[in-house]
Amino acid sequence: MKRILIVEDVELNRDLLVQLLEEDYELLTAVDGAAGLELAARARPDLILMDLSLPILDGWEATRRLKATQGLRHIPVIALTAHAMCGDEEHARAAGCDDYLSKPIDEDILFEKLGRFLGTDLGRA
């Protein structure tokens, strides 16, 4: 089973993602960017869903550090964020995010992106 790390500080958003994904993926969660980086280094997830507005270490910097680390840079990072203004997706990609999904989350698009990066087809898109 593929392992996804969810880095999200808002409990409601985190719980929603867990409910959506728990049947199909092994899930790990972190509530800030620093904890997310630490967990990524220990657990080596197959993909990271990264909120960008996080306490302690924001998702922009956490992604930069992840992509600068030899053993972690291969892990795909999908930015999950309320930052949906013009230029935010480009900013997220410049920080190292492999893809971008704005909140509120469209479940079909989320599963399509997961399938693309993880090679899983759950028939949801």
Image: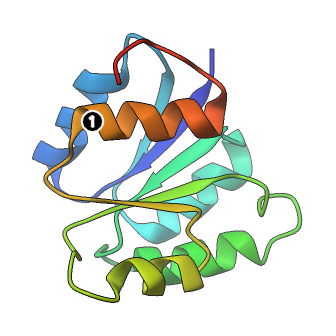
Query: Is 121 or 76 nearer to us in this picture?
Result: 121
Residue 109 position (above or below residue 89): above
The residue depicted at 34 percent of the width and 83 percent of the height is 88
Residue at the image position 35 percent from the left and 73 percent from the top? 52
> How many numbered badges does the structure rendering display?
1
Where, quadrant-wise, is the N terminus in this rendering? top right
Residue 34 in view (yes/no): yes
Tell me residue 49's x, y (percent): 44, 51
x 23%, y 23%: residue? 19
Please name whichever residue, 72 or 102, is drawn nearer the observer in this view of the structure. Answer: 102
**Coloring applied to the structure:** rainbow
Task: Tell me where residue 28 appears, x and y as whole percent.
Answer: 48, 36
Q: Is residue 75 left or right of residue 89?
A: right
Q: In the rendered view, does 75 fall on the left or right side of 93? A: right
Residue at image location 72% in from the left, 72% down from the top = 67
Q: Is residue 88 left or right of residue 114?
A: left
Q: Residue furthest front?
A: 125
